[in-house]
Image: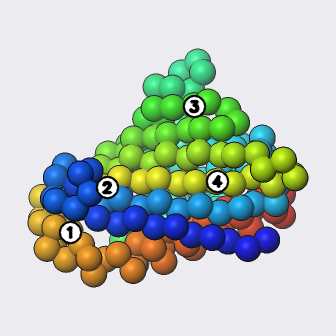
């Protein structure tokens, strides 16, 4: 199957001016696997497919998923970062979302899954990052130069998710 990545990177939720959200990414991939398996692997096995998440553990589980808290450890260029997360949406097998809080930035990530009817599933990931402190100013000043890096990282993440799903 081919992968199609669609991106929108920019400052602010209003389409360009710098606001609360300083960077947004959107990417999609078609995975040759049924929607239930893709949903389960996308949400319950993040450390297995993500190139950045190295640990993912539940702190407190809530009935139905929403409100469940967890800790994710990420690593990028040898630097470890811990994030505290909360599940904000859990609608199997079509949608999920989390809110992550870290020292350098806060991140909202949403997944929308669509059954394409032929045994394949389209996964769309949307993320909104808000930098904190000096990172906020760096993104505001240099955000356009980070666009290529963000597109490449999202492409790698979605390709890795597709590989895990299609071999499971």
**Separation of disc 2 and disc 1 at Cα?**
10 Å
- Judging from the image, what secondary structure is the residue with disc 3 in? strand
* Residue in view at x 78 percent, y 41 percent: 36
Residue 110 appears left or right of 35: left
Please report the residue visible at 24 percent of the width from the left and 72 percent of the height from the top. 143
User: Which labelled disc corresponds to residue 90?
Assistant: 3
Residue 25 vertical position relative to residue 58 in the rendered view, above or below: below
Q: Residue at x 87, y 52 (%)?
A: 119
How packed mark 2 is, by other alpha carbons closer than 10 Å (few <14, some 14-19, many 20 or more), is many
Q: Is residue 15 left or right of residue 165?
A: left
- In the rendered image, which residue does mark 2 sit on? 129
Image colouring = rainbow
The answer to whether any part of residue 87 appears in the image is yes
- Between marks 1 and 3, how big is the CA–CA gap? 30 Å
The picture quadrant where one finds residue 8 is bottom left
Q: Mark 4 points at which residue?
A: 123
Q: In which quarter of the image is the N terminus?
A: bottom right
Label 1–label 3 contact, CB within 8 A: no
Extreme-front residue of the structure: 15
Disc 3 versus disc 2: distance between alpha carbons? 20 Å
Comparing labels 4 and 3, the label whose residue is closer to the camera:
4
Marks 4 and 3, the one that precedes in the sequence: 3
Is the C-beta separation of discs 2 and 1 under 8 Å?
yes
Disc 1 target residue: 139
Please tell me in which quadrant of the rendered image residue 147 appears: bottom left
Q: Which of marks 3 and 2 is nearer the N terminus?
A: 3
Query: Quick one: label 3, few (<14), some, or many (20+) residues within 10 Å?
Result: some
Secondary structure beneath dot 1 equals helix
């Amino acid at each position: 199957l081919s992968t199609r990545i669609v991106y929108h990177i920019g400052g602010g939720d209003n389409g360009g001016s710098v606001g609360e959200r300083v960077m947004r990414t959107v990417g999609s991939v078609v995975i040759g696997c049924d929607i239930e398996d893709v949903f389960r692997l996308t949400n319950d096995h993040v450390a297995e497919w993500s190139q950045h998440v190295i640990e993912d553990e539940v702190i407190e589980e809530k009935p139905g998923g929403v409100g469940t808290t967890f800790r994710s450890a990420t690593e990028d260029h040898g630097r470890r970062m811990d994030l505290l997360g909360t599940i904000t949406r859990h609608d199997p097998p079509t949608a999920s979302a989390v809110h992550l809080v870290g020292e350098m930035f806060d991140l909202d990530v949403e997944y929308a899954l669509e059954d394409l009817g032929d045994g394949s599933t389209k996964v769309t990931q949307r993320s909104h990052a808000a930098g904190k402190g000096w990172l906020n100013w760096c993104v505001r000043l240099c955000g356009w130069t980070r666009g290529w890096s963000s597109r490449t990282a999202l492409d790698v993440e979605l390709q890795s998710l597709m590989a895990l799903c299609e071999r499971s």
